[in-house]
Structures are given as C-alpha cells and as structure tokens.
Amino acid sequence: MTMLQPPASLTDIVIAVGANLPRESGETAAATCLWAVDELGRIPGLSVVAVSRWYESAPVPPSGQPPYVNGIVRLSGRIDPAGLLARLHEIEARAGRRRTVVNAARPLDLDIISMGDLVRASPDPVIPHPRATQRAFVVLPLRDVMPDWRDPVTGQGLDAFLPGVADQDIAVMKATPAD
C-alpha cells in the first residue's frame, strides 16, 4: 500500500479497480489493474494519493466466472463526475472491455465509489456508488487507503459495513500483481 499526503483543498476521489479476464494483448488481470492505476494518474487534474493492497475475490453475484483481482485507488483533485465517468470508460475500453451483459466477466472494471462528500442520485454517475458498502472487495481495500472513510449518505464508517460483507469470499493476494 502506498500513501502520500493529499493537498487539503482538493477532493478525495475513490475508484474501485477490478479485473478477472486477461487483456486481448495477453496481460493478466493483475497486470491490467496495475496498468489502470497508472492510467488513473494520467487523468488531468487528478493525482494518485494511495493504492490499497490487492485482493482476490469471488464474483458478486456468484457465477462461474474466474475470481477477480480488486483494489482501491485514492485520488486527489477536482473533476466533474460525468467527465470522470467518461475517462474511466475510455480506460476500460483501451483495456478491451466490451459492455455486453450486466456482471459479465471483464478485463477491467473501474467504478467511482465516492467523490468527497458528494451525494448525487442523477444524472449518471450515481455517487456514492449504491452497492459499494455491500461489497467486501470495496470495503476491505477502502479501509487500507481511507480507514476513516464515511458513507456520505448514512454517515457510517467502514466498521459498520464489515459484518454485512463478512461472508464474502475474499483474501489479500500473497504476491503483488507485478510479481
């Protein structure tokens, strides 16, 4: 886990990173996640503040898909939510993601989890992510990079969500994705 000090005047932006298929060019899901962190750091106006440990998790909802590599990237900066979503979709497309059916296996998935204390029901993207606190693959890595994070809707901290995700199949990866 890498931690840097964010400038106080900028917004904390939390992005979930996940993948469970290799890219068309052959990179593993883990390598694609690392590539995505670099790509997030290239978005104008944003800088990477911290990257969580990497986790391996079973797909949610359960399916016959391979396990996912998941992590959280904490960014700092200012960007319009719709503009950020468009940039995330561009990065996913460059990784080979094709949007077919909901919850399909994919070479890269990038989700906006939160943008400071912003609460936004419409237009897309909905912020905070409506299912973030129900997913161990978000809650556990988020605890790595922002242990004091609070859900902007409920005001609850991460510890309040741990019992609800305790039965989900997830483990810290023993080796870093670059190994």
Image (cartoon, grey):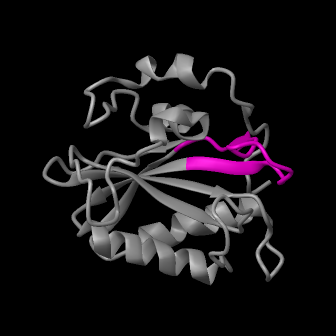
| Nearer to me, 174 or 124 | 124
Query: Which quarter of the picture shows residue 86?
Result: bottom left
153 displayed left or right of 129: left
Q: How many marks?
A: 0
Residue depicted at x 79% and y 72%: 27
Residue 162: x and y, percent? Answer: 52, 21
Quadrant that contains the N terminus: top right
| Residue 33 to residue 49: above or below | below
Query: Which quarter of the picture shows residue 65?
Result: bottom right
38 displayed left or right of 12: right
As for residue 175 lying within the magenta part, the answer is no
Residue 147: x and y, percent? Answer: 40, 28
Residue 4: x and y, percent? Answer: 38, 46
74 displayed left or right of 20: left
| Residue 105 to residue 54: above or below | below
Start and end of the magenta stretch?
52-71
Residue 172: x and y, percent? Answer: 71, 34
40 displayed left or right of 118: right
Residue depicted at x 74% and y 53%: 177
As for residue 58 lying within the magenta part, the answer is yes
Query: Which quarter of the picture shows residue 107?
Result: bottom right
Q: Looking at the magenta stretch, what is its main secondary structure?
A: loop
Residue depicted at x 69% and y 67%: 32
